[in-house]
Image (tube, helix red, strand yellow):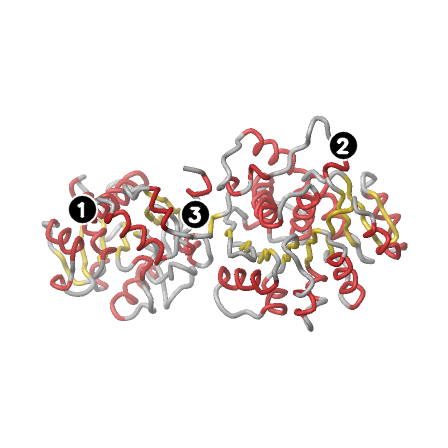
Amino acid sequence: MSGAAANQLLTTDEMSRADRAAIAGGVPGERLMEAAGWAVAREIRRRWTRRPVTVLCGPGNNGGDGFVVARLLRRSGWPVRVALLGSADRLKGDAALNHARWRGPVEAARLEALDGAGLVVDALFGAGLARPLDGDALALVGEINRRRLACVAVDVPSGVEGNTGAVMGEAPRCALTVTFFRKKPAHCLDPGRVLCGDVVVADIGIPAQVLEQITGAVWENAAALWLERLPRPSATGHKYDRGHALIVAGPASGAARLAARAARRIGAGLVTVAAPASVLPVVAGDMPGNLTADLDAYDGLLADRRRNAVLIGPGAGTGEETRRRALAALAAGKACVLDADALTSFSENPQSLFAALGPDCVLTPHDGEFARLFGSTGDRLSRARVAAQDSGAVVLLKGPDTVIAAPDGRAAINTNAPAHLATAGTGDVLAGMIVGLLAQGMGAFPAACAAAWMHGAAADAVGRGLIAEDLPEVLPSVLKALDSGATAHPD
């Protein structure tokens, strides 16, 4: 089984289908529930010393998992208190079976059930909740947060929507979430991702082959998605084999210079920075390894077929000239990255941009730029996927939980970006990394995924105190680590 398949994300419906397929294939549901509860109990014992535990059980299979957890922890000598939301006589199937196997008392799921607890297990609802929490469930979750109790979620924290990460009313802030078979989008998308704490994916006996019956196309971004397509220099090659990126600079050239350095560090054979004549000396003096050209010669620069990838946006300025240059690059058949000012320049007429885009193009908006081009309705994953389909380009929606979406429906959620990436210029570096990969012939979707992941890995390597200029300098070590740890491609 490939590493990419291990990183596939399943919606709540797809996970239900996986469960049903496993049961239809001969794996009893009772065994799946026992394995799920065992996995949660194991992770609790690994992380905490023995202490009083309150297990909150809901009315469905998530609650059934909770009864297994309670039984196994008590067997290990932990003091366990079980509280059930709703009536025991309404439990069904495997949940009812495991309620019967619990030999201790079961109390109503009310606030007093939390008294004296050193740890809480949230087995109320899991990912299948379709409406905001209310009543006793809402009160319990609010009290867990108010008392700052250590909490472990079974599947996802109750109140987190499994497909979007959105909070429906309130959800507990968990130290640990144990989910099963595969993660769901909520484990990767904020605010659900933050509320989950550490996420452990447990093998509960669902055969990997059930994925063949599920046509999912969303992954947590990881090297296995794109590593085999990552360009590598050939021993017999030369610089033009590694592509020639053209980066447009404006009167304030710092953003374009950051992008140019990143494009070269990630492997582009040549980079030309086209800038106004007034700043050409600054550009040339800062980075003697770049080629420089007067921006007035832009159309002629595009005519050179060796310049095969273009970045417009960082510090380019907004307005008619930026629009014209973007459309000219697209008309010339170049692979393009459009960022920042280039995107803002089309905010009054986005359809004129969409009509010119193609599959070798990457748009890299933050939330504000995205809203001006596409609107802001829906969750981040859905918005990015619809935007990619509507525009015909790969859309990289930047944020702590960056989403990369392709026009054909594929999507990846990037989860390795540390908080210290939130500093000026890091987005310019990311755009430069993407255009550098496009120049080397990497496809737009894998290039955007690879750049986003390496961007996060480089930032993590630098640590606190990071500034944007640090990122390109760390890329060689990130690339070296990837070369030494190759994994399989999803295909």
**With 125 as the anchor, is 429 left or right in this view?**
right
In the image, what residue type sits under mark 2? Answer: His
Looking at the image, residue 352 sits to the left or right of residue 4; the answer is right
Q: Residue at x 66, y 69 (%)?
A: 350
Q: Specify which label sits upstream in the sequence, 1 or 2.
A: 1
Q: CA distance from mark 2 to mark 3?
A: 37 Å
Q: Count residues near mark 2 (Cα–Cα under 10 Å), then give few for <14, some for 14-19, many for 20+.
A: few
CB within 8 Å, label 2 to label 3: no
Q: Give me the C-alpha separation between circle 1 and circle 3.
A: 37 Å
Amino acid type for the residue under numbered disc 1 = Pro
The image position of residue 295, as x and y in percent, is 86, 55
Q: Quadrant of the N terminus?
A: top left
Q: What crowding class fits label 1: few (fewer than 14 Cα within 10 Å), some (14-19), or many (20 or more)?
A: some
Foreground disc of the pair 1, 3: 3
- Where is residue 88? Give x, y as percent: 13, 61
* Labels 1, 2: front one: 2
Mark 1 or mark 3, earlier in chain: 3
Depth check, mark 2 against mark 3: the one in front is: 2
> x, y percentage for residue 467?
66, 47
Distance from the alpha carbon under mark 1 to that under mark 2 = 68 Å
Q: Position of residue 93 (x, y in %)?
A: 16, 56
**Numbered disc 2: secondary structure:** loop
Q: Nearer the viewer, residue 333 or 485?
A: 333
Question: Label 1's element?
Answer: loop
Label 3: state its secondary structure.
loop
- Position of residue 263 relative to residue 395, above or below, is above
Q: Is residue 418 above or below residue 58?
A: above
Per the image, the residue denoted by label 1 is 79
Residue named by callout 2: 238
User: Residue tagged by mark 3?
Assistant: 8
